[in-house]
Image (cartoon, rainbow, N blue to C red):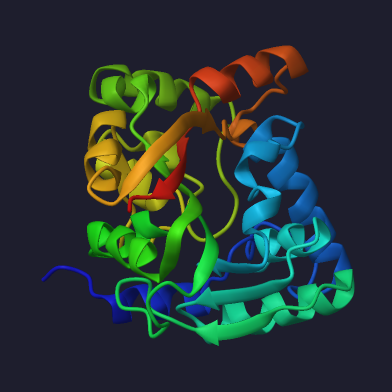
Amino acid sequence: MSPTVNDVDAFWQSNPLWSGESAFEPGSKEFFEEHRQVVRREGFAGKFDQRCLPLVGNRDVVLDLGCGIGFWTVELGLIGCQHIVAADLTQRALDLTRIRCNQYGVIAETVKQNAEAMSFPDATFGHVNCQGVIHHTPDTEGCIREIARVLRPNGTASISVYYRNVLLSLWPWISWIGRSIARLGGKLRGRGREEIFLLSDVDELVRTFDGKHNPIGKCYSRRQFLEMLQPYFHVKELFLHFFPARALPFPLPRLLHSRLDGRLGFLIYANVMKLG
């Protein structure tokens, strides 16, 4: 039987983002600060990409959809977004986001939401931020439709999903590289992912990246992502980020990490504007 939204809720309620990797207590300032540094270092090779943030004209009412443990909620607050709504499927994520916002002096409303069927009225938001979220739910296309629905005319969104880059496309034939990395000590810590490089099935590799028992994890080609977006949005730009160097058994030089991040990133970002 295919996993359901309830299965997704149960997993992430028990396994909030960055838990199992950090030595610090979830909810502590050290936990959040470590996570912030890791996102900047791993997610953007050390240089945060301002393209992920809304333009000044759409910072009045902003939705952080799938807020997780609040990284993007806080970043949106620190750039001066006026009314931020942080939404997530799990109560645990919302609790951690509230704690994080309090620690960083950010004011945000938190609300429990299913991205496939949100309760917000049509045309509520000027901008929706949704990073690395909708590849974890059964109806990813439905989430994109919902994002368009809750955006006002000419509203914008920044949306990212796991990207089937050339490494993942070739993985069935190059999985021996993963086994070699594993023998050298390469792994991801926590949530049962220690043997991830031994997997030869690419769909299992993607799903397991967020935990051995993660019910859903999908990746998309550029064409597939565009086909989901274009019925609802004008796609202004696509770009790549996220090369998880922490999983390797050796440090990457900064320049090489930057090149891999931009050319072989495992997240594809889309900056879009609502049609009509």
Residue occupying image coordinates x 31% and y 82%: 6
Residue 44 appears at what percent x and percent y?
A: 67, 34
**From this viewpoint, is residue 55 visible?**
yes
Q: Considering the image in quadrants, where does the N terminus appear? A: bottom left
Camera-side residue of 205 and 64: 64
Residue 43 sits above or below residue 115 on the image: above
Camera-side residue of 65 and 35: 65
Residue 166 sits above or below residue 68 on the image: above
Residue occupying image coordinates x 72% and y 23%: 251
- State the image quarter where residue 116 is shown: bottom left
Residue 143 vs residue 45: left or right? left
- State the image quarter where residue 170 is shown: top left
Residue 69 appears at what percent x and percent y?
A: 65, 69
Camera-side residue of 99 and 197: 99
Q: As drawn, which residue projects farthest toward the left?
A: 1
Residue 161 appears at what percent x and percent y?
A: 41, 46
**From this viewpoint, is residue 68 visible?**
no
Instruction: Give the number of callouts.
Output: 0
Residue 171 appears at what percent x and percent y?
A: 30, 24
Residue 166 vs residue 173: left or right? right
- State the image quarter where residue 247 is shown: top right
Residue 162 sits above or below residue 47 on the image: below
Residue occupying image coordinates x 30% and y 46%: 229
Camera-side residue of 205 and 50: 50
